[in-house]
Structure formats: C-alpha cells, structure tokens
Image (cartoon, rainbow, N blue to C red):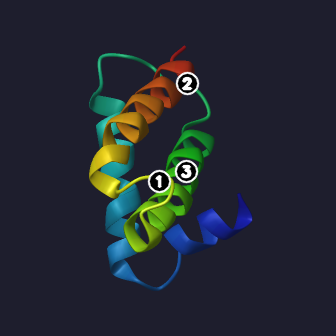
Amino acid sequence: MGALKSAFWAEDEGDKIFYERYLELVEADEHEYQDIDIMLFTILELAGSTGYNSILFEEPVSIEKYKPFLYRTVRLIIQSHRK
C-alpha cells in the first residue's frame, strides 16, 4: 500500500481530492466496507493494467467489448469488501 498511499498524500491536490471523494462515497453508501484502501488499490490496478492492453492493442479485445467484463469484475470486488 505504500505507493498508493504516497500517491494520495502527495503534493498534488487532485490526488487528495480524488481520495477524499472516494472516502465520502464509501461513507455515504448504504453498505459498510472493510479494507477500503485494498479495495481501491485492487480496482485501480485491475482497470489500469487490463484497460491499457485493451485500449492500446485491442487485446484480448477492444475496450468497448471488454468494458462489460471489467464492470462486472469491479462490482464483484466491491461486493467482496462488504462487511
């Protein structure tokens, strides 16, 4: 978590705003969550690495074809962090 936390607490105000907004959304949700930093890290890493290949190389498919799979997986990650 070191790199992720240091990115959120860097001097860049945009990073801080993103993380604060994320915390607000988690708090406002009707569900309670555990390990919210791990949840965010997992989603960002998944979307970043798989989206990269789909956008640049259309591998394994184009991003448009990949999005439904990514969205479903992100929803499952979020559900798995519910208390």
Q: Amino acid at mark 2?
A: His
Residue assigned mark 1: 47
For label 2, the SS is loop
Name the element at disc 1: helix
Question: On screen, 70 above or below 51?
Answer: above
Q: CA distance from mark 2 to mark 1?
A: 17 Å
Nearest the eye: 66 or 29: 66
Left or right, 72 with reference to 48: left
**Residue 53, position in %: x, y?**
50, 65
- Residue 19 is tagged as none
Three-letter residue code for mark 3: Leu
Q: Is residue 68 left or right of residue 6?
A: left
> Which residue position holds label 3?
46
Query: In which quarter of the view is residue 68 placed?
Result: top left
Q: Which residue is mark 2?
A: 81
Cα–Cα span, label 1 and label 3: 4 Å
Task: Residue 22 in the image: state x and y as whole percent.
Answer: 36, 48
Observer-nearest of 27 and 75: 75
User: Whole-percent x and y of residue 26?
Assistant: 37, 35
For the residues labelled 1 and 3, say whether their Cβ atoms are less than 8 Å apart.
Answer: yes
Residue type of the residue flagged with mark 1: Ala
Left/right placement of residue 6 relative to residue 31 reads right
Q: Quarter holding the C terminus?
A: top right
Q: Residue at x 42, y 53 (%)?
A: 61
Q: Residues within 10 Å of mark 1 (few under 14, many from 20)?
A: some
Indicate which label's residue lies in the foreground, 2 or 3: 3
Q: Earlier in the sequence, mark 2 or mark 1?
A: 1
Tell me the residue at 59%/46% (across/down).
42
Q: Residues within 10 Å of mark 2 (few under 14, many from 20)?
A: some
* Front in this rendered view, residue 74 or 14: 74
